[in-house]
Amino acid sequence: MMNKSITALYTNAKRPATSNDTAETSSHNQQDNEIPSAHLRRKNKRTMDNGEGPPMKKGFGAIEMVQIVPQKARYTFADLGGCESQFLEVCRLTMHLKHPEIHSTLGIQPPNGVLLHGPPGCGKTMFAEAIAGEFELPLIRISSTELVAGISGETEEKIRLLFQKAAQHAPCLLLLDEIDVIAQKRETAQRDMERRVVSQLIACLDDIGRSVSHPGSSDQDLIIDTPILPINRPKHFLVIGTTSRLEVIDSALRRAGRFDKELALGIPDERARTKILEIVCRGLRMDSNISMKVLARLTPGYVGADLQALSREAALCAVNSVKLLEVEPRLGSQ
Ligand SMILES: Nc1ncnc2c1ncn2[C@@H]1O[C@H](COP(=O)(O)OP(=O)(O)OP(=O)(O)O)[C@@H](O)[C@H]1O
Ligand SMILES: [Mg+2]
């Protein structure tokens, strides 16, 4: 059972409107959800000499490819089935984002990161997004493969910028999807670059909550289209890493103070499968004698993605039977 008092504490707490929110320009995101959006753009010194034309290829040329735009999450906890105990745990872990005064009053360090792990298709990415949706937090979501670059030092620079950006939008969630791509054990790493990337990630995690980098203050090459944050704005954000290969993650990252907590989304049991089926089939028109409980009993080992595929397959069968009903009589008359 979910602890209702904890969830109520969160859902009732609205994010205070700041002048920044209204001052933000750009993007359809703002109309939808009033969550600030941001773009990275080059300073003129990186353009051609006359200040016009395309940017010159120089150094970290690919950094501008990282689109760091806080989004409004598409899901909430109501869109996930069978994860009640994880929801409760997450409520505790995200408490400092909605109520920073609790941790500051008690004088304790809030958590910096959570690792969500489980087999492919068990809903890790969806769960991470649902946390942002449930607590109305801006979500900066990036697939870790997007951070990997060919040029030496570029991946580390992208990671640094990403964390800088998250700090500017704090309180928010930073989702590093498939984090194993950039966080593999250093002792088995084949290249120096991989070790440096893990070290950079560790450094960034250790820095959370210590400082807020203001646009352009530390990076002379970039202007970030967001206003400078008020001093008293909470600086904490939570990094969520998802992986289906927990065992390959570097042990230093799994240390307390970095990814403080590891949440397992395992293979759902029969009760969880019933709930997932109810969710994935909720838009479907079905015969009244179909029982989700029976379906759940017949599908041991299925994860959420499998159950969704099952519902799609069933829908496709229904479409095919309609087609056959239409075509068969015509074929018969020939
Ligand atoms: N608990 C759940 N409740 C409802 N739907 C679910 C659940 N788990 C998974 N799904 C369905 O499965 C789909 C895939 O989920 P998701 O992409 O989050 O899995 P994943 O664990 O991140 O997989 P991967 O490891 O391959 O990235 C979702 O879009 C959703 O439709
Ligand atoms: Mg995923």
Image (cartoon, helix red, strand yellow):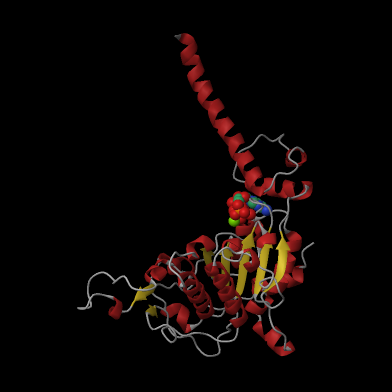
Residue 313 x %, y %: 59, 36
Quadrant showing the N terminus = bottom right
Quadrant showing the C terminus = top left
Relative to 251, does residue 16 appear above or below in the rendering? below
Extreme residue toward the left, this view: 50
Q: Residue at x 28, y 79 (%)?
A: 44
- Specify whether 72 is left or right of 4: left
Relative to 151, does residue 308 appear above or below in the rendering? above
Extreme residue toward the top, this view: 334
Q: Residue at x 38, y 84 (%)?
A: 220
Q: Quadrant of residue 94?
A: bottom right
Q: Quadrant of residue 226?
A: bottom left
The one nearer the camera, 108 or 321, is 108
Residue 219 x %, y %: 42, 82
Q: Is residue 21 visible?
A: yes
Extreme residue toward the right, this view: 1
Q: Is residue 281 visible?
A: no
- Specify whether 228 is left or right of 50: right
- Specify whether 274 is left or right of 198: right
- Specify whether 142 is left or right of 109: left
Q: Residue at x 58, y 36 (%)?
A: 315
Q: Residue at x 54, y 28 (%)?
A: 320
